[in-house]
Amino acid sequence: MYRIVTKKVLTPTLVLIEIEAPMIAKKAEPGQFIILRVDEDGERIPITIHDFDREKGTVSIIYQIVGATTEKLSHKEEGDYLQDFVGPLGNATEMPGCKKVAVVGGGVGTAIAFPVAKKLHQNGVHVDLIVGFRNKDVVVLEDEFRNASTNFYIGTDDGSYVRKALVTELLEEQIQAGADYDAVFCVGPMMMMKFVCKVTEKYNIPTIVSMSPIMVDGTGMCGCCRLTLNEPDGPVTKFACVDGPDFDGFKVDWDESVKRSRMYGEWERRKHEETCNLFKKEVK
Amino acid sequence: MAANMSLKKNEMPSQDPNVRNKNFLEVALGYTEEQALDEAARCLNCKKPLCVEGCPVNVQIPAFIAKIREQDYEGAYQCIHETSSLPAVCGRVCPQETQCEQRCVRGKKGDPVGIGRLERFVADWHNSHTCEVPPRPASNGHKVAIIGSGPAGLTCAGDLARLGYDVTVFEALHVAGGVLVYGIPEFRLPKSIVQKEVDGLKDMGVKFEMNMVVGRVVSIDELMEEYGFEAVFVGSGAGLPMFMHIPGENLCGVYSANEFLTRINLMKAYREGSDTPLMDLRGKTVAVVGGGNVAMDAARCSKRLGAEVYVVYRRGMEELPARKEEVEHAIEEGVIFKTLHNPVSIQGNENGYVSGMTCIQMELGEPDASGRRRPVEIKGSEFELPVDCVIMALGTSPNPLIKNTTPGLEVNRKGGIVVNEDGLTSHPGVYAGGDAVTGAATVILAMGAGKLGAKSIHESLSAK
């Protein structure tokens, strides 16, 4: 069992929890993920590591309440325990030799962009951190982002905060203004990553994307997280849990990955509703 | 007692096929005492028992059957347990027809003795009658780490614990048992039986550390250098599923058998209200590609979830590598075999879900390197099979995690860990066995490898 040390509700649907997991904290690196189960009969869900404290022995994650499992998770408070917490899984983000990079995050993906930006920044890399949110109400972690970057750019879809701009627009502005990036690291909704890659491909800037497909075991056994990379010799199947989660964004078959990520969409919506109703009944 | 010279084995009482293909309860119900005694009387107690040679862990078969005849069932259990850590498991999932029972002299004329069924009877008798915990062996102070809690790891752990070793098993998943819990379905091997075996090891002092992905959270070298383990046995099992690399294989509704079975067995997705999703197969059509035990398990699970099920296999019925009993059970339950068929491509609808699978018919040609007749495509015989779900049961390739994080650990071309005749790898103090070495094989072969690992570790550490 793994104790929730702190819990911060960032927005009504975005929550940060810090979990006591000393062995994972000792090994965790930016870009890696964990798998958790909320309770005895719970589903295994992968969530990318947001932060870790090796001395304190804790690992932080940020999750968005979207389905039944994250709904149940949101009812766990400080001092409560999670059934299972496994990691660190996947390969750490590597950007060797880069002197100047853009780290682009969208929505909950910004939670993952943070540790990558922080590490690069600490290592003396020039980091332009570009984040986008739907609107003012869901903007989170602004101070942390500023501290983890050389320059920080933020936009909202509806213009309710700072300025109306998509991350693709913010990124392209910087590129056109002469920001000569060695590489771009991008994490967020699949569609956002796809369009960021469309921008960077125009300027031939290598782009790493952090993929978050559906997983079951997350250790290289079930093959659920497979995706296709279009290599020069033809399509190649890769597994996000052991080969990723980072991939060359120019090679990912986005349309296939988008469809695969929606496999259980309808089921998830129904299940989430059922779970919400259960919690409502309990409250009554 | 006079030998029972009946040419027929006692039939295994089983759930009716049309009842069991709608539930996940165990198919075979086990012999009654009367049936067990009758079957035991068929053993001739050969001076030179060939059956024992056919067993990868050398269970003293005539000796345990003799104990059954004396109605000393606990004695029979102890006799099996001397060489096999998991009798209740082996009695259910071993391919006896190619091992002990294949060598039985009674099989020359009529059926061989039902050795597997008797083993199961004895193990079940023990599990329901004996509750006293055997005394813990005195500790010899040596620490051994086992990676993976499948059949190889559990066997190795059991043998070493009996010798007084301080054994810790590291398991990546949240439940112990490996393929016994995530792969083999409840109706063939109830999970309570695996749990009992694990509990038995705990009673002997074996420690289980769950959620430990060795290679990520801790490396083999760290286990040895920082945590003081003097030897390590790697029984990490089969790895990533293989695919055919045909068009449409990544459509929604194409599962690897590993994923499909893990969702059902480990995550209990077959239960109403499960938190883990699975495609709703009621009224749908499923094609399972492959002909091994895993394919049979996937097909029979699909049937139980309400689907019409095809097994698509490129060779003939005779060549199916699955246990004979599994094939028979699948046929009885209504699974349709499309042998001498091979998938060419999978078709999808506009939302990315499977709508059909194009197959080509095959014929058997000249024998290939494996000695089996090679399937050859019949030109122009392609046709589309309308299906909603495809399950690929084509085997696995070893998980690269341990290899990638253990310097000096040699693997072969296919990624299997290289071991010598003692089960020792190229890394000092590190032994390996089971699917991690051989690629996908059987429970009993993995157990044999676990036994060998334990023996070699004991020889090495006791000489220190």
Image: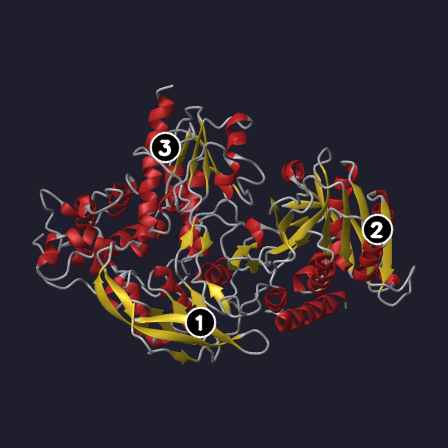
The residue identified by callout 2 is A178
**Label 1 crowd bin: few (<14), some (14–19), many (20+), radius 10 Å:** some
Q: What residue type is labelled 3?
A: Leu
Examine the rendering and report whether any part of residue A5 can be seen: no
Q: Identify the element where label 2 is drawn.
A: loop
Name the secondary structure under disc 1.
strand
Tell me the element at label 3. Answer: loop
Q: Left or right? Give the position of A262 relative to B453.
A: right
**Could you tell me how far apart the alpha carbons at marks 3 and 2 are, in whole angstroms?**
58 Å
- Residue depicted at 40% across the width and 47% down the height: B414
> Which image quarter: residue B188?
bottom left
| Pair 1/2: label in front | 2
Q: Which residue is drawn at 67% across and 47% down?
A: A31
CA gap, disc 1 to disc 2?
A: 47 Å
Residue shown at 76% from the left, 65% from the top: A283
* B103 vs B344, nearest the viewer: B344
The mark lying in front, picked from 3 and 2, is 2
**Residue type at numbered disc 1:** Ser
Compute the Cα span from label 3 to label 1. Answer: 42 Å
Question: How far across and how far down the image is residue B439, in percent?
Answer: 37, 49
Q: In this view, does B334 lie above or below A158?
A: below
Looking at the image, residue A26 sits to the left or right of residue B294; the answer is right
